[in-house]
Image: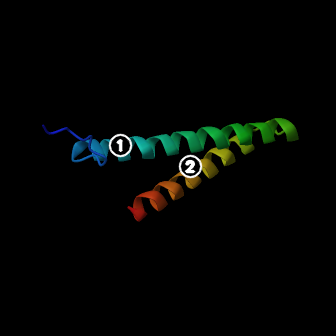
Amino acid sequence: MTSKQPATKLEGAAAGMETGWMATGHLLSGVAVWAVIGGLVDWWLGIPSHIGLVVGMLVGAAAAIYLIVKRLGSS
């Protein structure tokens, strides 16, 4: 009797889909978290033009892209 062992590594299209979802999740969560932080800074300082929100979104996108490149570059 042979028992089927579940594969630990995804192959083919599934591996690419996993990478895509990982990158999308990092990007969306980075922008969302830093947008909230920037919005809170705007509210705390009383800035009416939402500069902190925009800066927070840009910082979140840059940080997420850095993490994506770092993670995908090592594998």
Foreground: disc 1 or disc 2:
1
Q: Quick check: 65 left or right of 49?
A: left
The amino acid sitting under disc 1 is Glu
**Residue 12 showing in the rendered view:** yes
Residue that label 1 marks:
18
Residue 75 location (% of width, % of height): 38, 61
**Residue 50 showing in the rendered view:** no
- How are the colours assigned in the image? rainbow
Residue at 78 percent of width and 37 percent of height: 40
Residue at 40 percent of width and 40 percent of height: 21
Number of marks present in the image shown:
2
Which residue is outermost to the left? Answer: 1
In this orientation, which residue lies closer to the viewer: 12 or 45? 12
What is the secondary structure assignment of the residue under circle 1?
A: helix
Which residue is outermost to the right? Answer: 45
Residue 61 disc label: 2
Residue 68 location (% of width, % of height): 47, 54
Residue at 44 percent of width and 46 percent of height: 23
Residue 39 location (% of width, % of height): 74, 37
Q: Mark 2, residues whose alpha carbon is within 10 Å: few (<14), some, or many (≥20)?
A: many
The quadrant where residue 36 appears: top right
Residue at 62 percent of width and 44 percent of height: 57
Residue 68 disc label: none
Q: Quick check: 17 left or right of 67?
A: left
Marks 1 and 2, how far apart in space?
20 Å
Chain-order first, disc 1 or disc 2? 1
Residue 42 location (% of width, % of height): 79, 39
